[in-house]
RNA sequence: GCCCGAGUAGCUCAGUCGGCAGAGCGAUUCAUUCGUAAUGAAUAGGUCCGGGGUUCGAUUCCCCGCUCGGGCUCCA
């Protein structure tokens, strides 16, 4: 007999040698059917592992995150099995589960590549393997034997050599392939397929099936651009057909919200080929929304004690030498223009210019904190493959501010900066935040440990007083200071990194900044970089996707469209539009040579917040028919009532 | 930058096994004057991404480039 403890605290007795599958079966048929793996005293094990007396055992089902993880990992194995079977001479590297699915990296003989037709063929073969319900069988062997088993697979051999000689714990990118102490584990299934793997896996391939191969992509071996480019196949896998379908639906929804598509449909922004990659032009409606965003931002900054500055787009090389950009950022900078014996670089960042403003005169502790703010256009040479609509462009506008403060002021300044950032983000309709605190890197960092600790604690205190969820990324800070990054979650659950608060001990040092302290001594100020939108263009793109093009009334380029029922009502429509405009609203009139239904549809497709229909009864009574974007149609609404209602919505939150 | 895929009317996309270029939507004009998501007809609209090659003939086949998309790397 073995006795195991269950998560609910109860105990259960089973015959000697019983495995987790038997335990699941003894609890219930449904659990036995849904079981994927088990944990024994917290360690994940295959269902066929014999139970240890006294262990706490939990059955993991496909419905849980852990279970899905295994399901995807096992599906990745089947993918590798299919590819190795179909393509003689193919070799395989790693194939971990990832968010929503899995991938596997391959190399085909002679540098051959996969096509979409290959994916269909591979998927069909995978379905055969799944139909055959092959058991996954675990085996532990020592590294020498493993090197023979994988004699034809150099990437596997490389993994085996690393895990048998080095500290596998430190090698996060082994991605669960193997790990240990001179011994490695393998999983075999079917006729002769074996993969190096820590496991655990589902009991047999028959447990899989709700998957789809999605795309083929290039991926560097071990993520290193100096190493060979492998062929990566991505797939998605789920516990049920319904879950798979729901996931595919979410992907379609994200595609529907694509800001590049909406930008075109709503006539906001375009990317003429003539300009070059990553460079956009703003059409009147897009420019209007942007203008509203920027106006709101300026107003808030003015209220927040910032002072506005402007700086040029170019500066000579010596500025970038002093700032250090030519040492550590040159790859992302546009090349210089040579003039009059000097080299002028387009700016990739605004900070050195703001430093120049700080340094333009003597600064006393009485002047601090000094908060400089600029909507500064910067140019960065992004790799051609990285450019993506407004979300990643080569020319963009940072809502950049640099705060110069005394060491003592840093903590309180950070707290108020974070409050400010969150308050503005909320006004734009985001209220789900996740922050990351990045601390001192172990290898290279400027400034004393005391300075770092003080600033890091200031950041942590700011996060805590803002009651913000955060994770710590130990050693994740830049060499010049610790930072907070703020992610927002959008309407369909995607996270976007927007704002950043970055403490900088480096630039004040490089530019020899100082202020005069109360005792007359010169002291070094601390600089804080703070971007809120990050990039105005990118923030606009994120907003567009968040709202799926339906901007809230205060940001909508057209807030109402007035539709006369027939030509007779055109004069009254113009009167209504005029009254709303006089109240400060943005209104257009859609004249009546098309049928009403058609004009309503057209206005709805433009996602205009208020479609206003006026006919004979409205002319007589001074009313309008109101068809709001997200509510029922109302008739006979007095114009004054509508105006008041729209004005209330038209103010930023 | 690297891997895979794509580029045909303003948009979405057919098509040509190498022989005068197509649809729907949109635009324009005319008719229609209508109470809440597509009125009808007509017309206009093309360097089939660019350059080179093969060919009697290239939008189609080949080569080189450009741009876009999905990834990798990077990142606001």
Image: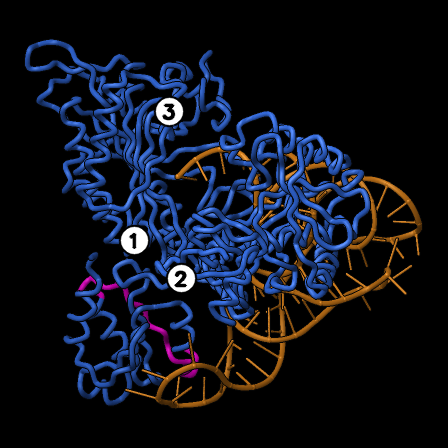
Chain colours: A blue, B orange
Labels 1 and 3 touching (C-beta < 8 A):
no
User: Mark 3 = which residue?
Assistant: A441
Q: CA distance from mark 3 to mark 2?
A: 39 Å
Q: Chain of mark 2?
A: A
Helix, strand or loop status at disc 1:
loop
Pointer 3 local density, CA inside 10 Å: few below 14, some 14–19, many at least 20: some
The answer to whether residue A594 is magenta is yes
Residue at left offset 29%, top offset 58%? A555
The subunit carrying tag 3 is A
In terms of sequence position, does the residue under pointer 1 or pointer 3 come before the other? 1
Instruction: Give how far across and how far down residue A20 sits, in percent.
Output: 53, 58
User: Of B47 and A606, which appears nearest the observer?
Assistant: A606
Which mark, residue A432?
1
User: Of all residues shown, which one is farthest toward the left?
Assistant: A518
Extent of the magenta region: A581-599
Query: Disc 2 designates what residue?
Result: A548
Relative to residue A169, is residue A199 depicted above or below? below
Camera-side mark, 1 or 3: 3
Q: Secondary structure at mark 2?
A: loop
């Amino acid at each position: 007999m073995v006795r195991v403890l269950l998560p609910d605290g109860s105990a259960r007795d089973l015959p000697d040698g019983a495995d987790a599958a038997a335990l699941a079966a003894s609890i219930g048929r449904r659990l036995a059917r849904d079981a994927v793996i088990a944990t024994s005293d917290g360690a994940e094990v295959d269902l066929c592992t014999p139970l240890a007396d006294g262990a706490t055992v939990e059955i993991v089902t496909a419905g849980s995150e852990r279970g899905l993880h295994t399901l995807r990992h096992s599906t990745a194995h089947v993918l590798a099995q299919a590819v190795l079977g179909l393509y003689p001479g193919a070799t395989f590297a790693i194939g971990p589960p990832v968010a929503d699915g899995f991938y596997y990296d391959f190399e085909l003989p002679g540098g051959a590549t996969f096509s979409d037709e290959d994916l269909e063929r591979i998927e069909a073969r995978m379905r055969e393997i799944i139909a055959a319900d092959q058991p996954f069988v675990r085996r532990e062997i020592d590294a020498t034997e493993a090197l023979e088993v994988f004699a034809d697979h150099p990437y596997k051999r490389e993994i085996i050599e690393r895990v048998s000689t080095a500290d596998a714990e430190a090698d996060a990118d082994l991605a669960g392939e193997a790990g240990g102490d001179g011994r490695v584990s393998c999983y075999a299934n079917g006729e002769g397929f074996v993969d190096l793997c820590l496991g655990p896996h589902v009991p047999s391939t028959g447990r899989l099936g709700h998957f789809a191969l999605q795309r083929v992509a290039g991926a560097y071996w071990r993520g290193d651009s100096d190493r060979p480019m492998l062929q990566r196949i991505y797939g998605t896998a789920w516990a049920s057909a319904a879950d798979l379908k729901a996931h595919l639906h979410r992907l379609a929804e994200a595609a529907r919200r694509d800001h590049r598509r909406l930008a075109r449909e709503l006539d906001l922004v375009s990317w003429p080929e003539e300009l070059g990659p990553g460079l956009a032009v703003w059409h009147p409606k897009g420019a209007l929304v942007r203008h509203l965003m920027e106006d709101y931002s300026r107003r808030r900054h003015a209220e927040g004690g910032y002072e506005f500055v402007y700086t040029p787009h170019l500066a000579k090389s010596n500025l970038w030498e002093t700032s250090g950009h030519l040492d550590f950022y040159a790859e992302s900078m546009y090349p210089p223009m040579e003039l009059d014996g000097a080299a002028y670089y387009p700016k990739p960042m605004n900070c050195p210019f703001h430093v120049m403003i700080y340094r333009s005169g003597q600064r006393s502790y009485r002047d601090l904190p000094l908060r400089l703010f600029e909507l500064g256009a910067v140019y960065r040479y992004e790799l051609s493959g990285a450019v993506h609509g407004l979300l990643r462009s080569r020319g963009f506008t940072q809502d950049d501010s640099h705060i110069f403060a005394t060491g003592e002021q840093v903590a309180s300044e950070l707290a108020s900066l974070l409050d400010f950032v969150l308050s503005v983000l909320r006004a734009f309709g985001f209220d789900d935040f996740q922050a990351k605190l990045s601390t001192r890197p172990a290898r290279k960092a400027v400034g004393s440990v005391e300075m770092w600790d003080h600033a890091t604690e200031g950041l942590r205190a700011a996060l805590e007083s803002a009651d913000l969820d955060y994770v710590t990324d130990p050693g994740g800070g830049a060499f010049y200071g610790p930072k907070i990054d703020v992610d927002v979650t959008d309407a369909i659950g995607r996270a976007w990194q927007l704002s950043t608060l970055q403490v900088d001990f480096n630039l004040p040092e490089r530019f020899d900044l100082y202020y005069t302290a109360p005792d007359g001594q010169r002291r070094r100020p601390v600089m804080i970089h703070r971007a809120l939108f990050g990039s105005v263009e990118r923030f606009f793109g994120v907003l567009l996707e968040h709202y799926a093009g339906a901007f809230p009334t205060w940001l909508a380029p057209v807030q109402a469209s007035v539709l006369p029922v027939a030509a007779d009502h055109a004069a009254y429509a113009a009167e209504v539009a005029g009254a709303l405009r006089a109240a400060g609203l943005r209104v257009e009139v859609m004249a009546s040579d098309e049928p009403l239904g058609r004009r309503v549809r057209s206005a709805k497709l433009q996602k205009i917040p208020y479609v206003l229909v006026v006919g004979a009864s409205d002319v007589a009574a001074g009313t309008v028919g109101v068809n709001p974007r997200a509510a029922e149609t109302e008739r006979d609404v007095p114009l004054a009532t509508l105006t008041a209602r729209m004005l209330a919505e038209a103010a930023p939150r």
